[in-house]
Amino acid sequence: MKNPKPFFFIFLTLILASCKTPTYMFTSGPRSGVNFTSGRWLMNELDCPKKSKDKLTEESLAFFKKNLGDRLFYINDVNGLLISRKIHLNPNKTKLKELKDGTGFDFFINISTTKRKSDFSYIELYQSDDEVGKNEAAVLVEIYDLNSQEIIYSQNVVGISQKTKTEPMWSTEKSNKFIDNVEFYKTSDKLMKGALKKIFKDLDKRSVK
């Protein structure tokens, strides 16, 4: 039996050489963190595409559970709440008071993710130099202090993996070899997960634990 390692390293080298590095932008500017040391916290059901919902929910619960332990509750696991499942972002004080009265919790976590563009799949073959497009996704995390009726954390991150028009350096004919015509992109689903992790890293760094 042939050793599969050389083929693995060839494939890995191909991916690394052809992968379009994604960019992540914090669009909300610098934000202070939160104090994780007290209170009961309620995490809302994520507002996100169905395909990614389970994975992003798992990722979110794991992060907040790490910082809050048994003081974190997921909205779908709590009975008797007198609120709607759809909590709009950037709520005013009246809405925050309604959340306090309807839940009895001290803090509320609201997460929204969106796919903005999905021009490319994970692997694209034989793209022309003139072809342009991008995959783009955005994630917004908000945390509300229900006792003071204030938004205490709000951060938005946009992830982009794109192809721009390229001009060849030399006036030579473009290679037809397969290995020279493979491009790897972060899909919008992967960009959502990456953007969420960027926010959690920022929140973890700035918060009191």
Image: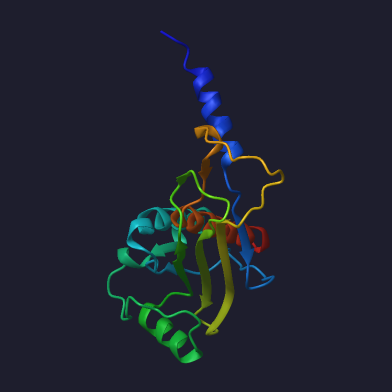
Q: Nearer the viewer, residue 134 or 51?
A: 134
Q: Residue at x 64, y 53 (%)?
A: 166
Q: Position of residue 34 (x, y in %)?
A: 61, 68
Q: Quadrant of residue 9?
A: top right
Picture residue at 42% right of the left edge, 57% below the top: 56
Residue 111 coordinates in the image, percent (x, y): 46, 68
Which residue shows up at 50% across the image and 33% down it?
Answer: 178
Q: Is residue 107 visible?
A: yes
Quarter occupied by the C terminus? bottom right
**Up-down: is 134 above or below 172?**
below
Q: Quadrant of the N terminus?
A: top left
* Total numbered labels placed on residues in the image: 0
- Point out the residue furthest to the top here: 1
Image coordinates of residue 192 in percent, x first then y, are 48, 59
Closer to us: 126 or 149? 126
User: Vertically, is 14 above or below 141?
Assistant: above
Picture quarter containing residue 2? top left
The coloring applied to the image is rainbow
Where, by quadrant of the figure, is residue 12 drawn? top right
Q: Residue furthest bottom?
A: 94
Q: Residue 168 or 77: which is nearer the viewer?
A: 168
Q: Residue furthest toward the right?
A: 169
Instruction: Name the residue: 51% across, 56% down.
Output: 191
**Would residue 41 be visible to someone looking at this image?**
no
Q: Is residue 87 left or right of residue 156?
A: left
Residue 165 position, x and y percent, is 61, 57
Identify which residue, 195 or 207, lies in the foreground. 195
